[in-house]
Image (cartoon, rainbow, N blue to C red):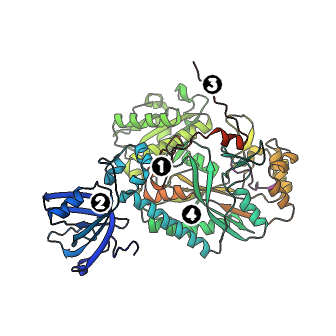
Amino acid sequence: MTQSRTHNCNELRIENVGERVTLVGWYENIRRVSKNLGFVVLRDFYGTTQIVPETEEMMEKFLSVNCESTLLVEGVVRERSSKNNKIATGDIEVVPERVEVLGKCIYNELPFEINRSREADENTRLKYRYLDLRNPDVKRKIVLRSKIVADLRKAMTDHDFLEITTPILTASSPEGARDYLVPARNHPGKFYALPQAPQQFKQLLMTAGFDRYFQIAPCFRDEDARADRSPGEFYQLDMEMAFASQEDVFAVIEDVLPPIFEKYGTYSVASKAPFTRIGYNEAMEKYGSDKPDLRIKLHVDDVTELLSDCGFEAFAGNVIKAVKIDNFTNTRKEIDAMIDEVFVTTANKVYWFKVDENGELVGGISKFLQEKKDEIKKALNLTTGDFVAVTAGKKLAAQKTAGAVIKIFGNKIDHCIDRERYEFCWIVDFPMYEIGEESGQIEFCHNPFSMPQGGKKALLEEDPLTINAYQYDLVVNGIELSSGAVRNHDPEIMIEAFKIVGLGEDAVKAKFPAMYNAFCYGAPPHAGIAPGVDRMIMLLTADQTIREIIPFPMNKNAQDLMMGSPSEVDKKQLDDVHIQVVLPKKED
């Protein structure tokens, strides 16, 4: 052991009785029984040990320092008269002979009670994160993270992948999010960018002749926070394979991830290979989402033809989707609450009806459906006790609203979901292009470096919005864990792909000079994927926010309250990098 301690605070057992030991750790608390007797809890990284001062002098030494000070305690181990089977050291206690203060806590009051830090305001926890991490429950998540990352590394090396680090300072690239920019001191007016992902570098490694690459890669994106995404930086298990197809990537992931989920997961059951595969269009039609939670046993039916002329104004001229839930026993109040939650999520209304004990359609919009009652019951296979949620609108809006119904209702109705498992699926055959919501122009749907299905011929001859890409997402329990693709390694196909989004050959060469030039020297077909490490660990621990499993996370506003970041810098630092700050004008 280090620091002259003979044992850690989770190590002593009944067989150590009679030994003289030295322990070090944090002074967690004291329960005073009398002026010369008390019970002290000493805590270190490993656990706790009870210390029992039995003299007035020794009691005064403990009472003279504040809790959370660090102490060295020398003493003799003895058997406890009142054992505690809730802790590993519960059979013994230490009678101190010497106490030394190693690091004094100068504050009489802490921002929060260490063992109850998770009950504190989140910003307070983040400001005093070093105290929050002393909480064994919080610390345990970070220890678990370390073990998971170690096992991921071993699994990848066992599959003959080579760990290679890629640059942090690089060139700005259109990855789909805002870059973090770093001014270049020796190149006035020019900037480095922190990598949104090692995308180009890992493809260049394939072109350079490396067969299998991986790294636990730091990625930087200037995005807003949400429950499953931390602002600023995140980590991913980045991998790429040369002379590989989509099937090769699937085989590796299906071999690497299930054992990790079974070993470390809150739930012990995880999907076995092969994972379910669902085409993007099928996922949107059947589940109303490209991130379906296959634990939920609900699906979407298209009822446009059946209900469009029923006389209900909201259905006229729209796509109409229905989600049936059997054995529905929820109250009207509960129905309204779930429908309101869908509206908050999608800004679209949900309509409903159900089947009563007489087989009649009742409630909600049922009065508009009476003339088609038998057709509706047959089409949706309805029986007594069934509930139907209905959405309407343009196709994508109707689909997504139905998907929100599945997620929200499915998670609140126990018989609709098997919670105690990890259900993986692949979403495949993503569209290569889409019409941008803001621009109204044709854009890449996902990764611009993906290989289009049909190759150059499809780009030249087909409607771009009908072309699929060799792109795939890995989804677990309704959460997107990763995106990946077979890469576009042919410079001629790359030029044609970018032409469709308005970037000519010169622009492609200027924006991606290294990759374009490298591909002109004979590039292997290659494919890859990058599961998010932070999101993976959040799934494994069943936490509701990703900040719980990151050692030093930012808050929702991308601020590090502990370090005071982002912060202002002095004028000299700005002058060195040729930057002048122009703040937005304050509104009157």
Q: Nearer the viewer, mark 2 or mark 4?
A: 2
Q: Nearer the viewer, mark 3 or mark 2?
A: 2
Q: Picture coordinates of residue 233 (x, y %)?
A: 58, 51
**Image position of 35 (left or right of 86):** left
Find disc 2 in the rendering and name its residue.
Answer: 27
Q: Nearer the viewer, mark 1 or mark 3?
A: 3
Q: Verify whether residue 460 appears in magenta.
A: no
Find disc 4 in the rendering and name its residue.
Answer: 275
Q: Earlier in the sequence, mark 1 or mark 4?
A: 4
Prevailing SS of the magenta stretch: loop
Q: CA distance from mark 2 to mark 4?
A: 50 Å
Quadrant of the rendering where the C terminus is positioned: top right
Q: Earlier in the sequence, mark 1 or mark 3?
A: 1
Q: CA distance from mark 1 to mark 2?
A: 53 Å
Q: Picture coordinates of residue 409 (x, y %)?
A: 43, 43
Magenta part of the protein: which range? 446-455
Which quadrant of the figure has residue 36? bottom left
Type of amino acid at the residue the image marks with label 1: Leu
Residue 585 is marked as: 3
Type of amino acid at the residue the image marks with label 2: Tyr
Q: Identify which residue is drawn at 49% across, 65% down.
A: 146
